[in-house]
């Protein structure tokens, strides 16, 4: 039976080792297409290197996340409910400089593709339609009914997104499948995480979540070596939380 394999990840947040690990998974699995669902930059110490890495991959579609948009707009003020401090973002964006904005400007908010008649959508999170801030508020405890409401703009059968850094699979009342792929490497586990989606010609599919061991403390050492503001605080909240 004919099939296609697709690699999906999100929210790598400047974690180069985790990024390389998930791409190794995609290569070993024979993925012909890869979707990066956004937030390539910020938090970790390798934002520049991560951007260069994904831009070098010709089979990788890079979508715009909220941190990527902040870089694009040069907006570094700490947002409400965010634990990414102004000083930290300012340092990251200064490290990136101006040259990458022309590439990030081309990152789409939303991609929809069809495989054997099955429609699949990729995005960072549910969208508002407002170009100034296109992302809806995070749902703390999502339900199938809430996702049906949030993603009503999308008519795809399968909908993939990130942003919340938490794994979630739900099937709505509309029979849409919602998959939060989580974060590739911005979480308190020693694993780089991604999804491999296999779609078959009879429109059936298999969704595999794959976690590969790596050393998450490398990103803290890099932040310290760059003397990045609030690096220990950022690491403790995003990479080393004990309440998750």
Image: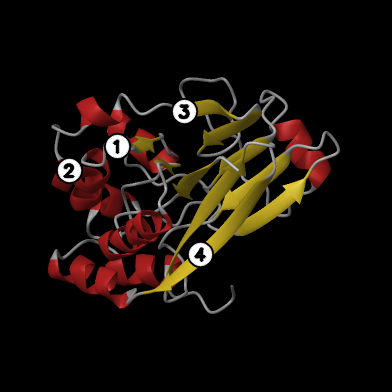
**Residue furthest front in the image:** 1
Q: Please tell me whether residue 222 is drawn above or below residue 173 in the rendered image.
A: below
The residue at the point 33 percent across, 64 percent down is 21
Give the spatial CA distance, label 3 vs label 2.
Answer: 21 Å
Q: Nearer the viewer, mark 2 or mark 4?
A: 4
Give the spatial CA distance, label 1 vs label 3.
Answer: 15 Å
Question: Of the residues under marks 3 and 4, which one precedes in the sequence?
Answer: 3
Q: Secondary structure at mark 2?
A: helix
Check if mark 1's residue and mark 2's residue have beta carbons within 8 Å. Answer: yes
Which residue is the site of mark 2? 96
Report crowding for label 2: few under 14, some 14 to 19, many 20 or more residues within 10 A (C-alpha): some
Can residue 19 be seen in this snapshot? yes
Question: Of the residues under marks 1 and 3, which one precedes in the sequence?
Answer: 1
Q: Secondary structure at mark 1?
A: helix
The residue at the point 47 percent across, 75 percent down is 189
Which residue is the site of mark 1? 71
Give the spatial CA distance, label 4 vs label 1.
Answer: 29 Å
Q: Nearer the viewer, residue 84 or 123?
A: 123
Give the spatial CA distance, label 3 vs label 4.
Answer: 25 Å
Which residue is the site of mark 3? 109
């Amino acid at each position: 039976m004919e099939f296609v394999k697709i690699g999906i990840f999100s929210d790598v947040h400047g974690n180069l080792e985790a990024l390389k690990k998930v791409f190794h998974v995609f290569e070993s699995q024979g993925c012909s297409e890869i979707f990066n669902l956004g937030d390539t930059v910020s938090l970790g110490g390798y934002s520049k290197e991560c951007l260069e890495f994904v831009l070098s991959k010709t089979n990788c579609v890079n979508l715009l996340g909220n941190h990527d948009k902040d870089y694009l707009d040069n907006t570094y003020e700490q947002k409400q409910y965010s634990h990414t401090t102004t000083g930290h973002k300012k340092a990251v964006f200064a490290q990136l400089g101006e040259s990458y904005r022309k590439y990030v400007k081309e990152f789409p908010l939303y991609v929809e593709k069809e495989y054997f008649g099955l429609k699949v959508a990729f995005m960072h999170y549910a969208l508002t339609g407002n170009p100034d801030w296109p992302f809806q508020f995070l749902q703390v405890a999502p339900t199938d009914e809430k996702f049906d409401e949030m993603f009503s703009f999308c008519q795809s059968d399968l909908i993939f997104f990130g942003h919340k850094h938490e794994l979630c699979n739900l099937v709505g009342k509309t029979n849409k499948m919602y998959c939060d792929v989580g974060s590739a490497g911005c979480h308190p586990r020693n694993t780089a995480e991604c999804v491999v989606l296999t779609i078959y010609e009879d429109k059936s599919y298999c969704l595999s979540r794959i976690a590969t061991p790596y050393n998450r403390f490398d990103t803290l050492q890099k932040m310290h070596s760059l003397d990045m503001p609030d690096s220990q605080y950022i690491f403790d909240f995003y990479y080393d939380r004990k309440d998750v």
